[in-house]
Image (cartoon, helix red, strand yellow):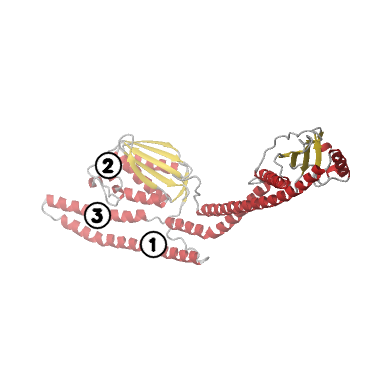
Amino acid sequence: MRRWWRPRTLRGRFVLIMLLGVLGAQVASYGIWSWQENRDRLVRLDSLSRHLADSLAATVRYFSSLPYEYRHIVLDQLRDMGGTRFFVSVNDHRIALPHTSGGRMRNMVADNLRNGLEQELGQREMHIGFSRPSDLRVFNNEVPLADLPAHWAHRSLAIRPLSTPILVVQMPLKGGNWLFVATSLPMAESLEDAAWLSGDRLFVSIVVLLTVIALSLWGIRWSTRPLSVLARAARRLGDDLESPPIAERGPRELRDTAMAFNRMSERIRHQVEERERLFSAISHDLKTPITRLRLRAEMLDSPQQREAFVRSLDEMDQLVKGALASVKGLDLHETAIAIDVDALVKGIIEERCVHEAASMHLEGRAGWLSAKPLALKRCLANLIENAMFYAQHVDITLHRDSEYIVIDISDDGPGIPHDQRERVFEPFVRLEPSRSRHTGGSGLGLAIARHIVRAHGGDIHLGEASRGGLNVQLSLSLGH
């Protein structure tokens, strides 16, 4: 079962490796960068909050030391002058702050402030929190922060419009009043927990990935193009042994591969030519002695001996003719052309039905196929004739899908035992008693048929037909 995520081509696998490498490097580098950035933010906020605690302690000590009747006068004068580092007011009661979601940064700032104030002031009761500017109200919780004059807090709340959290510290004073201190931090944006993958970072990551994909596709396609040329040359060699050699250029490894391929194809051509010459010579040399022995056999006085002798000579002659037929059947020196498989099968059936008594049934459509016409016709003729000779009823089904043309030939004949179905594809193999020599066969039909089909990028499989006979399934590759 092929995994859906595994590319089928070498080019696709190279691109997948590149993408996984770049993605892994981006994730690792981004993780390290985020960890470093968060650590730096913590260090800066820690230092800032400690210094803020010292300044806030000094402010609290100053206003705590003022007599009650002077506190409001001093605060009004400071507001008219532009305020201080903090926005300070004195309330009759503690103002309850609206609940806001906390975070690691806010908790650290609050803890540092609390610890610093406790050390500087020795005061335990205090309330530290954060509020959204839109929710914060001052002066006994009566005046919204946004309604204050801008010059009252241009130092303590200098960010306009206010959008960052406001730090609020409330402490009890003598006389039942509460000191209210508020300020915006210089690093207020650092109080929010950073998103692991923000929009701009996601955009940069996508741009990098798309760039890597484009460059990888171009580079890998350029690098693997010689392999595609080599694959096409190998397919041409399977179809035509006289195909020209491929160019020996490119990187050293590809040049060496092209040279080895050209030498291999040349050796194959020489071996095929030597085989043809050998069989031709053997058949020529055997015909003369067989003919001479046949003439001498006619002079024998005993009819029984003469008949046995002639029968042996006939068998020898049949073997010689079968060997020559095998050589010619395996010789596929043809040019592939577009063939109408439906018309080819119908033509073979019409030619054979004149001489055979078996009933034929054809259904389905196969369409057109690029193949060698004479070789394919001989293959189909061998299989159809074989079915018609040993059966009374033959069913032929044609089917076409995205990759193959499938031809099923089923009959109601004696069939072939399961353990013999691969053996019958060997040359000169015939099964007894149903498919014996007296039928005239040489045992080469299935061997030649399988060779032709495999040369066209397909295969032949034998099975049991629904009628109990033999089922021959022939598949031909459309992409060959």
Question: As shown in the figure, which amino acid type bears the numbered disc 1?
Answer: Ile
Asked whether residue 160 appears in the rendered view, the answer is no
Label 3: state its secondary structure: helix
Question: As shown in the figure, which amino acid type bears the numbered disc 3?
Answer: Asp
- The residue drawn where x is 86% and y is 45% is 82
Q: Which mark is residue 457?
A: none
Q: Which mark is residue 317?
A: 3
Q: Quadrant of residue 152?
A: top right
Residue 137 or 146: which is nearer the viewer? Answer: 137
Q: How far apart are the two marked residues, 1 and 3, measured between alpha carbons?
A: 29 Å
Label 3 environment density (alpha carbons within 10 Å; few <14, some 14–19, many ≥20): some
Asked whether residue 243 appears in the rendered view, the answer is yes
Q: Earlier in the sequence, mark 2 or mark 3?
A: 3
Expressed as whole percent of the image width and height from the top left, the position of residue 130 reads 72, 40
Observer-side mark, 1 or 3, equals 1
Q: How far apart are the two marked residues, 2 and 1, measured between alpha carbons?
A: 36 Å
Expressed as whole percent of the image width and height from the top left, the position of residue 55 reads 76, 49
Instruction: Tell me, yes or no, whether the two marked residues, 2 and 1, touch with CB atoms within 8 Å.
Output: no
Q: Which residue is mark 1?
A: 268
Expressed as whole percent of the image width and height from the top left, the position of residue 460 reads 37, 46
Observer-side mark, 2 or 1, equals 2
Residue 79 or 71: which is nearer the viewer? Answer: 71
Q: Which mark is residue 417?
A: 2
Q: Quadrant of residue 69?
A: top right
- The residue drawn where x is 19% and y is 56% is 294
Up-down relation of residue 263 to residue 403 (above or below): below
Label 2 environment density (alpha carbons within 10 Å; few <14, some 14–19, many ≥20): few
